[in-house]
Amino acid sequence: MKIPALTALLAGIALSGAAQAMLIDRGGGLIYDNVLNITWLSDANYAKTSGVDADGLMNWTAANAWAAGLVYGGYSDWRLPTTLQPDASCSNHLAGGISFGYNYWQ
C-alpha cells in the first residue's frame, strides 16, 4: 500500500468513530457535557428534592415554566432536554390507545 492511500485510510478510520461525550463533574450538582456543550443538573428530580413539587411529577407546561424560572449554580438559562422522535413506530400505547411515548405531556 502506498503512503497516501494508507494516510487516507487511517484518516477515514479516525473520522468515522462515534463522538463520545465526556461528562465532567463541575461540583455543586452540575455535570458538563463536552460534546453538547451543555450543563446538566446531576439530580434529575431536583423539583422534588428541592421541595418545589411534592412528587416531582409535572405536566409539560408546568415543567417548562419551572425550568425557565430555575436559578441554580449561578445559571438562570435552564430548559428541559429535547429530542427528535427517531421514527413513527417509537411510541408506546396503553390498552385504551393513550400514548405514553414521545412528548406524552404536550
Image (tube, rainbow, N blue to C red):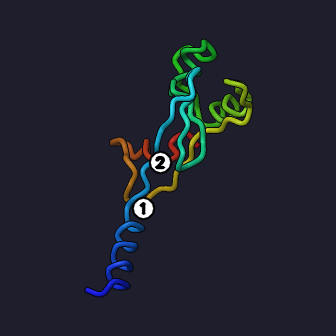
Residue 12 circle label: none
Q: Helix, strand or loop at disc 1?
A: loop
Three-letter amino acid code at disc 2?
A: Tyr
Residue 86, above or below 98 = below
First along the sequence among labels 2 and 1: 1
31 and 15: which is toward the camera: 15
Residue 40, above or below 73 = below
Report which quarter residue 38 is drawn in.
top right
Q: Quick one: which residue is furthest to the bottom in this view?
A: 2
Q: State the separation of the CA atoms marked 2 and 1.
A: 10 Å
12 and 68: which is toward the camera: 12
79 and 29: which is toward the camera: 29
Q: Dot 2 corresponds to which residue?
A: 102
Q: Residue at x 51, y 29 (%)?
A: 25
Left or right position of 19 against 38 = left
Q: Quick one: which residue is furthest to the front in this view?
A: 3
Residue 2, above or below 43 = below
Where does residue 13 sit, x and y in percent of width and height? 34, 70
Three-letter amino acid code at disc 1?
A: Asp
Report which quarter residue 11 is drawn in.
bottom left
Q: Helix, strand or loop at disc 2?
A: loop
**The C terminus, quarter of image:** top right
Q: Dot 1 corresponds to which residue?
A: 87
Residue 6, above or below 73 = below
